[in-house]
Amino acid sequence: QVQFVESGGGLVQPGGSLRLSCAASGNFLSIYAMGWSRQAPGKQRELVARITNTGLTKYADAVKGRFAISRDNAKNTMYLQMHSLKPEDTAVYYCNVLVSLSGPPVGPWGQGTQVTVSS
């Protein structure tokens, strides 16, 4: 079973950028689809970006045009580049395997990485 460790979060001002990393152990190449989800205080976890092992991507409307998901199969790592950050992007960000590009996350959740957008 693949396990993930998220990193790269922090405090950033509105309009700033961050790059999150998701390091995977196990058979990374066998994973067809992966995604980044986030959970803000008092809100449900939402899937914001998805990617397949062939590079197909899909984004939630709230982040489209500002976030970019990518994966480096050689490094067993997935990334989320975030630009033009807004206070409403504040959340704990998690990565996970997806059932399919349009399907839900499966498997255990990691610790996540906190992103705080504030002046």
Image (cartoon, grey):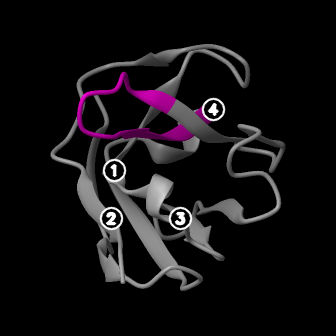
Residue depicted at x 63% and y 32%? 33
Q: Which quadrant of the rendered structure holds the C terminus?
A: bottom left
Answer left or right for 74 relative to 101: left
Q: Secondary structure at mark 2?
A: strand
Task: State which tag comes first along the sequence, 4 or 2.
Answer: 4
Mark 3 or mark 4, which is nearer the start of the sequence? 4
Q: Nearer the viewer, mark 4 or mark 1?
A: 1
| Callout 4 touching callout 2 (CB < 8 Å) | no
In magenta stretch: residue 38: yes
Q: Amino acid at mark 1?
A: Ala
Q: For mark 3, does the 10 Å Cα neighbourhood hold few (<14), some (14 to 19), or many (20 or more) residues?
A: many
Q: Residue furthest front?
A: 119
The quadrant in which residue 86 appears is bottom right
Give the Cα separation between the discs numbered 2 and 1: 6 Å
* Residue at disc 4, secondary structure: strand
Q: Is residue 18 left or right of residue 100?
A: left
Give x and y (percent) for residue 59: 74, 41
For the residues bearing labels 4 and 3, Cβ distance under 8 angstroms: no
Instruction: Tell me the magenta residue range.
Output: 32-46
Query: What amino acid does circle 3 point to?
Result: Tyr
Q: Circle 1 is placed at which residue position?
A: 91
> Residue 60: x percent and y percent?
71, 37
Residue where numbered disc 2 is placed: 115
At horizontal 48% and vertical 53% (from top left) the residue drawn is 88
Q: CA distance from mark 2 to mark 3?
A: 14 Å
For the residues carrying marks 2 and 3, which lies nearer the camera in this image?
2
Q: Which residue is mark 4?
A: 33
Determine the residue positioned at 56% across, 45% down. Answer: 29
